[in-house]
Image: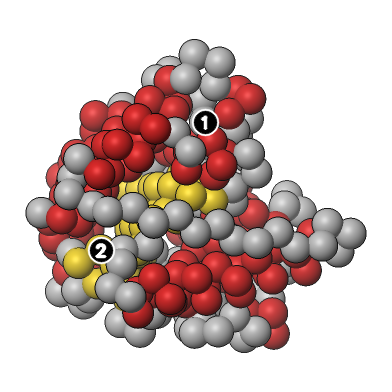
Amino acid sequence: MGAGPTRLSTDDPLLSGIENAGWELEHDEIEPVDESDPEIVRVIELIRRLAASVGDAVSDGAFPLVFAGNCNTCLGTTAGAGSRDLGVVWFDAHADFDDPEESEAGFFDVMGLAMLTGRGWRALRQTIPGHAPIPERNVILAAIRDLEPYQRRRLERSELSRIPGEIEPGRFEQAVAELSGRVERVYLHVDLDSIDISEARANKYAAPGGPSLDRLLDRIAEACQRFRVVAAAITAYDPSLDDDERTLSAARRISSGIAHGIRG
């Protein structure tokens, strides 16, 4: 999935779709870190650098659209965009809601949303400039379906607004209406494996039972209409599993949808 951001950010049809929505593009790539460092050290340092880059973009009046290999980058994107009074609309087949004390996966990337809402790795999170936890009740988590029993139990105890699987439109509309009563600004997170695997295989973790691309695009448009989206990310694309480029085609439509939605 580390190859995904480069593939997306250099795809001419994808970039043209954004420009056709009236945007002028500027490319900023986060500098790599020392590969000899442990994984968590590397990831957190990249997140710090991302927070600074997003902050610079926002200060310049630009909209930050982040292409990322993993979902932990949400910490840097939200920190740079300003976490205060920020909501989250998050599309993903997985909850990314493990913390170190509960996780049986041992995979740092499944902890992104937990850290964003203030659970786990407190000392490391505090080294991210601008980071502040976002209350669970200000997060909509949609398209989730691939969960271990312990992950399902943790979600059921949380205050997240959860719309599983195919994203039933009425439930999503209700969640959006409730969230809009608490926040005006949101961070939009689109993990490409939120799309049903029958339409696109974003990565090796992709799963059946998700929304069609058209339904996902409708929900993204709805979020853009109801909130001021201040930053967005498209994550978790593994080009090596996309021989037919169906996922790349989906990413093009999603990027264009976001670009038109925030312009609208």
The amino acid beneath tag 1 is Ala
According to the picture, the residue beneath numbered tag 2 turns out to be 229
According to the picture, the residue beneath numbered tag 1 turns out to be 202
- Residue 146, given in percent of the width and then of the height, sits at 53, 38
Q: Considering only vertical position in the picture, is 181 above or below 68?
A: below
Residue 37 picture quarter: bottom right
Q: What element carries label 1?
A: loop
Q: Which of the pair 179/238 is nearer the observer?
A: 238
Residue 246 picture quarter: top left
Q: Which residue is drawn at 35% across and 40% down?
A: 15
Q: Is mark 2 on a helix, strand or loop?
A: strand
Q: Would residue 228 be found to the left or right of residue 192 on screen?
A: left
Measured Cα–Cα span from mark 2 to mark 1? 24 Å
Q: Considering only vertical position in the picture, is 261 above or below 253?
A: below
Q: Considering only vertical position in the picture, is 87 above or below 15?
A: below
Residue 53 visible in the picture: yes
Q: Residue at x 52, y 31 (%)?
A: 202
Please tell me how crowded label 1 is: few (under 14), some (14-19), or many (20+) other residues with Cα within 10 Å. Answer: many
Please tell me how crowded label 2 is: few (under 14), some (14-19), or many (20+) other residues with Cα within 10 Å. Answer: many
Label pair 2/1, CB-CB below 8 angstroms:
no
